[in-house]
Image (cartoon, grey):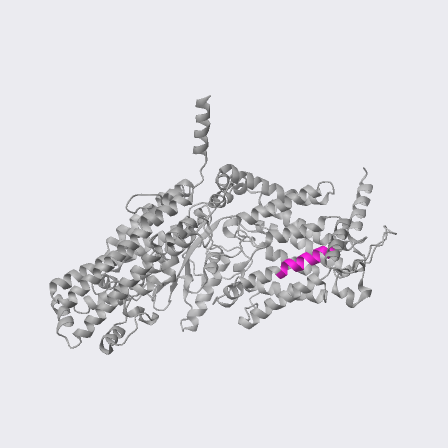
Amino acid sequence: MISAVAASCDKESSNSPGFDRGPLLENLGVNIIVPAYDSLARRAARLEEAAIEFTETRNEQTLGKLRDAWLSAYVAFQHCGYFNFGPADNLIFNASVNTYPISRIKIDDNISSGSYDLNAISSNSAKGFAALDYLLYGENPDAENVVELFDSDDEASARRQYLLDVVEDLRARCDAVYERWSPAGDNYLGTFVSLTGNDVGSATGMLLNGAIQYCESDVRDGKIGIPLGVRSLNVPIPANCEALYAQQSILLAVESIKGLQNLYLGKGKTDGVGFDDYLTALNARHNGDALASVIASQIDLALTKIAAIPEPYSETVEQNPDPAMAAYQELQKLVVLLKADMMSALGILITYQDNDGD
Amino acid sequence: MTAISLHSRLVNALRSAWYEPTPIAPLVTFRIVFGLMMAISVVRFWANGWIREFYIEPEVHFTYYGFEWVTAPGPVGMYALFGIMLASAIGIMLGWRYRMSAALFFLSFTYVELIDKTYYLNHYYFVSLVALLLCFVPANRAFSLDMLRKPTLAAGEVPAWSVTILKLQLAIVYIYAGIAKLNAEWLLDAMPLRIWLPAQSHLPVIGGFLSTAFAAYAFSWMGALYDLTIVFFLLNARTRPWAYIAVIGFHMITWMLFPIGMFPFIMILSTLIFFSPTFHTRLLERLAAVLRLRLNTIPRPDTSNTTKILPVPRIITGFMAVFIVIQVLAPWRYLLYPGDLFWTEQGYRFSWRVMLMEKAGYVVFHVEDPITGKRWDVMPGDYLTPIQEKMMSTQPDMILQFAHFLEEKYRAEGMNDAIVRAEAYVTLNGRGSRLFIDDQVDLTQERDGFRHKKWIVDLNQ
């Protein structure tokens, strides 16, 4: 009798294939999104410390530390770019910390004139990580030269002030977006995990629509395709590389895909519920294989192909475009899998419009 | 039964369904609820900001083949069109300058629908058809402002065709929606409900159930059965009350589960027309009492002579016959095309295929300058709204239209004869995404039309 009850209970639990989006959102929010913003805010704070130290004690050693702190924060940002909804969307976070290419003219003018408003949208191309790339490396990245620009150049003092202002703006923005999410702050996290529906305004809907859009236009196109010239009559635009002056474009692109991978697999500090588990629970297929593993393999492949692109990317796009084109094509396949197959399998809507089923 | 008596019974049935007088009440209810639902729909559409989002902001529109002359008339024109639509819907409801209202509503609504096929919905098509029928039926001869204006209009009875044609229209919608569900994917794989229902697992109480395969099969089979049979149960007086409960239940479930807007309510209220004249007369009397209107606004039908025949202009009978024949044939036109209907969508629209497939795609256009040989990519998202991009990426005729749009764009920039190829991948009902359009074909050399589009890659290739 007891065993019969136990068996029927057992059967019931294994028979309910319903995937609860609650734990997925919980894991994405608690284990991935908030820690990613937290890490970014901490590294941005260290960047600010390093900038203050460098402006006070200007030598190659403090410059080295500042450059490391910049790269470390930039890497942290690569994991956050996908969360382009809610607080990041309201704060126009991505564009205000990572618009590139920057306008050298605007930055040079700002330094010379000393009058600028970094809060203006028009200043997006004169601040953020890319502006720091220009300030800390520039045309001649030789450390001695850069130290001189900040130390004994005619505009050295104005340049130091501009550096501090840009870093402070960046740090404040990273703080602000973290504050919005943090349970100790505005607790958008609480809102996020409560939106368990499948419409455009649900947590899954907002996150995936935002992340896939970011993957298309900021990763595939912005980091790889546009410098390669796929959008410009096949004419490469090396000046549009991310981290152009520091020549770290590929390192950042690789980090960005790792961010996507973590998001997809639900991997943060621990390995939790991710979209792969969701797709597995739905038993979604892709031409005979499990869609969950097809996407995971495609992310791996894209990662391998991007990592194989020789740095500096600004030279590769003109002299050796084949490996970059190969990476671009794998990213393209990845976008198809995410935007068509995954969104379709998850039944996530992309607009509020009435629909009678295609 | 002899052939002759069968023949004469059929003739008699047709005669009574078309020429005999019937109380006007059902028609009046239909006119009022239709006008009301349309007015609400227009206000809702407006309030959602969709006039701007769908018809003003987009840079490009996907017109229907043969209706390329229908264009969005700019912000002022668009709001004017919807203003006319709203006023004429209210006019239909109140029976005010009824024929003009019905005609204006039909024209403004249909014009807006023809601007962009992105927004095609079967229920918009239904609204256009019903609005066209309302232009002909004398639904303003009772309980209307026209009648107060011109008391001689008042009539307690109308020729039966004017009620019959609306029932026929509803029957076509339901029965064809049912026939469309009789396919292997719907019945044997429970697709696409097997994808859509588990997405609702967050719903309280029923969420867990919706995630089961059983639920998907149950909903699929019940849905097909409902669509195929509901009209017959509504026609029969004995089963009608139960059938109507089923109508309400069915449409409310679909309303809760899917974002289908006003459609459930329109169908729930439209099917009231199957109820008896007595039911409608009582309904209108109650409405009159609530609105404190004088009762003589609903003339009593003349019941003294039940066998008389009212004159129906031949042109109306002829028009209605053609109208019905076209609708009966149109859903079968897909048989003239090779390939899988859901995949190619040749002959898919205007056929009451509702909620039949989960289809998603992704398309990139490769453009080549034939003179320099340079190639580059164009992302449609740069020119289209998300909904336009989503709809285009799974529909070959829209992909072709976009390719031609690009050709024209480059021509305007001084590049003649740009070569435009589409690299499109589509996933249909849970199959993995696969190549949709022959990516070697220069789409600028292909013309739209009713011929088979050879450049659609075969589904099972």
Prevailing secondary structure class for the magenta stretch in the rendered image: helix
Q: Quadrant of residue B84?
A: bottom right
Q: Nearer the viewer, residue B293 or A270?
A: B293
> Percent from the top left, x then y, of residue A207?
39, 53
Q: Quadrant of residue B43?
A: bottom right
Q: Which residues are magenta?
A: B27-39
> Percent from the top left, x then y, of residue A304?
26, 50
> Percent from the top left, x then y, of residue B236?
73, 42
Q: Quadrant of residue A220?
A: bottom left
Q: Is residue B349 above or below residue B3?
A: below
Residue B388 seen from this side? yes
Is residue B357 magenta-colored? Answer: no
Q: Is residue B91 above or below residue B457?
A: below
Q: Nearer the viewer, residue A166 or B427?
A: A166
Is residue B36 magenta-colored? Answer: yes
> Percent from the top left, x then y, of residue B31?
70, 58
Q: Is residue A273 above or below residue B457?
A: above
